[in-house]
Image (tube, helix red, strand yellow):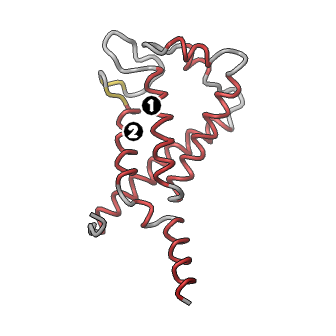
């Protein structure tokens, strides 16, 4: 299975997917970082579903600043990692976890209002679609093409042959 050959268009599409999702994460992180009034508190307090009490606890005054910091840092790390192609598989997993937590706070379930969640399509919403795309990124060698990982591996291999 390691000798699978991808066409240039397949690789281009996978890299484009990686960069676009990275841009989305980076944009969300930067917007939150530079907005002094942003907090996840209202998103957490309006959560619904079986994990509501967990999210309400996270929105408490003693913990919300930690949640906000982790959220912004996670978005920035995943965004930069995906855009630059650094530790792509790890940041794809981290991004999936962030999105899963966002989905579980406002699940797209029948009988629940969509609340602050965008793109709610009855069971499926934008968060689940992006998780599926991150699963694709995780499964394919998108860091071997057009990425900092590729550049560093290439330089390392030429240094070893000298």
| Mark 1 or mark 2, earlier in chain | 1
- Judge whether 63 appears above or below 135 on screen: above
Kindly state the secondary structure of the residue where label 1 is placed: helix
Give the residue pinned by disc 2: 131
Reading the image, the residue beneath label 1 is 100
Q: For the point 46% across and 33% down, which residue is it?
A: 99
Q: Position of residue 155 (x, y in %)?
A: 55, 78
- Alpha carbon distance from label 1 to label 2: 7 Å
Q: Looking at the image, which is closer to me, 129 or 101? A: 101
Relative horizontal placement of residue 18, taking residue 1 as reference (left or right): right
Decide: is 57 above or below 139: above
Disc 1 to disc 2: CB gap under 8 Å: yes
Residue density around tag 2, few if under 14, some if 14–19, many if 20 or more, within 10 Å: many
Q: Position of residue 137 (x, y in %)?
A: 39, 51
Q: At x 29% / y 62%, what residue is drawn?
A: 10
- Please tell me whether residue 91 is drawn above or below residue 44 in the rendered image: below
Q: Secondary structure at mark 2?
A: helix
How far across and how far down the image is residue 52, in percent? 50, 13
Quadrant of residue 12 within the rendered picture: bottom left
Query: Which residue is located at x 39 percent, y 39 percent?
Result: 130
Q: Which mark is residue 23?
A: none
């Amino acid at each position: 299975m390691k000798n699978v050959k991808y066409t240039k268009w397949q690789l281009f599409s996978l890299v484009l997917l990686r960069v676009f999702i990275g841009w989305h994460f980076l944009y969300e992180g930067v917007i939150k970082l530079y907005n002094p009034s942003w907090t996840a508190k209202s998103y957490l307090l309006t959560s619904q579903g079986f994990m509501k009490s967990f999210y309400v606890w996270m929105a408490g005054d003693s913990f919300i600043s930690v949640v906000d910091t982790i959220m912004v840092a996670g978005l920035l790390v995943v965004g930069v990692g995906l855009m630059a192609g650094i530790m792509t598989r790890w940041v794809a997993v981290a991004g999936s976890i962030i999105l899963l937590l966002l989905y579980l706070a406002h699940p797209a379930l029948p009988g629940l209002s969509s609340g602050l969640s965008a793109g709610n399509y009855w069971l499926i919403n934008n968060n689940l679609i992006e998780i599926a795309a991150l699963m694709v990124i995780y499964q394919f060698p998108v860091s071997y093409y057009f990425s900092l990982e590729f550049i560093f591996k290439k330089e390392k291999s030429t240094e070893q042959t000298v």
